[in-house]
Amino acid sequence: MNPRAARAVINGLLVGVAVIALFPLAWMLSVSFMQPGAASSLPPPLLPAHPTLANYARLFGYAGMGRYLLNSLGIATGITLLSLAINLMAGYAFAKLRFAGREATFRTLLGALVIPAQVTMMPLFLMLKWMGLVNTYAGVAVPMLVSVFGIFLVRQYARGLPDELLEAARIDGASEARIFVQIVLPLLRPIVVTLAIFTFLASWNDFMWPLIILTGQEHYTLPIALAALSREHVQDSELMMAGSVVTTMPVLVLFLVMQRYYIQGLLVGSVKG
Amino acid sequence: MRRRWVPWVFLTPALIVLGVFFALPVIGGFILSLTDFDVYALADLHNLRFVGLENYLALLRRPLFWRALAHTMYFVVVGVPLSIMASLGAALLLNSKLARFKGFFRTALFAPVVTTVVAVAVIWRYLFNTRYGLVNYALHSLGVQPVDWLGDPHWAMPTIIAFAVWKNFGYNMVIFLAGLQAIPTDLYEASRIDGASPWQRFRHITWPMLGPTLVMVGVLTMSGYFQLFAEPYVMTEGGPLQSTVSVLYLMYEDGFKWWNLGLASAVAFMLFVLMFAATALLMRAARKRGLA
């Protein structure tokens, strides 16, 4: 094949794949602005004939989506901050502090990755019921507060920090807490950002555990609320698309703005350590 | 000499959370799977009985469990290779020297990965609607009869697989892309001088050099696909005729709809054993070929 034809084929295929990847998202956005009922006609319209915000008004009005949006924001932010603190401390210790049992402990944690989280769901539910945490924000957050993957990511990155810097600080009499906060954390900034995005996206998108632990509507996160809504309003595609936009746009925008960090983290995490 | 307990202070929060909210429930889950914990035990623990392996035996005698297992295997055996092929194909396109606007295409192809499963599953439900869905409309204009994608037991699982491929291929694509970029270009130069065709270059350079990446991607994708749940929950509610009930869907219904938490724990452990065995088999096959 001559180079010009090859170029046309390759770029043509890329355009095709990009259209497949993006079309459902573009269609979601378009239908969310259609008049109620407009999408269910033949031929199926691609663009709203009379754009309207009515679906969003219904969504935030009687469907109470504002509350669920705040729930999702609050839970994802809380999980992100807490788990960052916990994973950063642990990852740093595994990378830079010397102690007996370090490798064995780390290997045990990695080994635990083969156990799917679902085996813990039934006993965890009973445990949280006993602790009074069923149907609370804390109940949603608890299993996401530590991530072995996150610890691994921090450890990989922190191993590159120069030991001399830490030793110099120790000789100057700095406490370990001070070394961690004032020297290590600023150096870990890129991986902190990466891990923050990962955690935020994961907790925002999480479905099965919140579905189990949230028994009342008032604490619903967006995915749970959307799933419940879709069971009640099967016919109402315009309302459902507005709901999908509200659920998925925040994370899509976050990804677009921060994608450099996200992709970098994905690649660090996928390299065997 | 520094105080020896200092590192453990840094580890304590992580180890406490993992111990209390992961390790303990794993052990607890196994014990639970040996009991008849049900809605009566939920009300009063005195109703709890130790039943040994009875839950596991009951599952093996239960047709729905075998069907859920078969559906999950179908999803894994068809879905994982399709996903990986889509990812690899997209990565090869993006890695081509002839491709333009690479940054834009990479972002576009990755976008479905970061979306919320529930939200995009809802979109697919409407796109694949029998009467008003765009998919059937497009097929109709090509002269194909409308297909009841999510309402026909034969088509529901393939539709869910197509959805999963669409949603996930971008993730492995990025990993493959990094793997492709790590292949030394002089290998390709040398083969070009030797007159190798593009296919020969792919077969004898790209494929073997990507081996370890392929194994890792295969293992991770497989264990993710074994955990099929949200897609059937949103798109089909396990139907039609229970044709999309997956193992986790069964666990969810047993455990949190009917409150048979003992039985549901047994389902979860069966899935764990299955995933472990499948991963071990894959790794063994890879080692035999010198890939891992």
Image (cartoon, coloured by chain):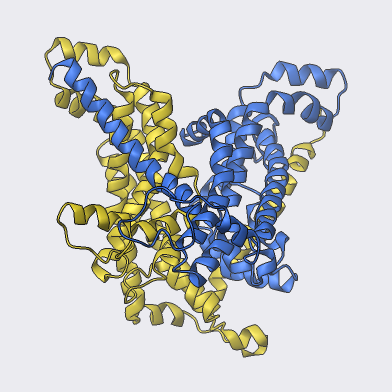
Q: Is residue A140 above or below residue A173?
A: below
Q: In this rendering, would B291 be left or right of A80?
A: left
Tell me what residue is drawn at x 70 percent, y 54 percent: A70
Residue B54: quarter of image: bottom left
Q: Nearer the viewer, residue A208 or B3?
A: A208
Q: In this rendering, would B78 be left or right of A255?
A: left
Residue sitting farthest toward the top: B193
Q: Nearer the viewer, residue B74 or B167?
A: B167
Q: In this rendering, would A10 be left or right of B237?
A: left
Tell me what residue is drawn at x 55 percent, y 75 percent: B256
From the top left corner, tell me how far across and down residue B5 is, in percent.
Answer: 79, 40
Q: Is residue B67 above or below residue A44?
A: below
Residue A50 can be seen, yes or no: yes
In the rendered structure, the colour chosen for chain A is blue
In the rendered structure, the colour chosen for chain B is yellow
Residue B292 can be seen, yes or no: no
From the top left corner, tell me how far across and down residue A155 is, in percent.
Answer: 61, 33
Tell me what residue is drawn at x 28 percent, y 54 percent: B135
Tell me what residue is drawn at x 68 percent, y 50 percent: A73
Residue sitting farthest toward the front: A50
Residue B291: quarter of image: top left
Q: Nearer the viewer, residue B143 or A110?
A: B143
From the top left corner, tell me how far across and down residue A225 is, in percent.
Answer: 58, 63
Q: Quadrant of the N terminus of chain A?
A: top left
Q: Nearer the viewer, residue A258 or B276?
A: A258
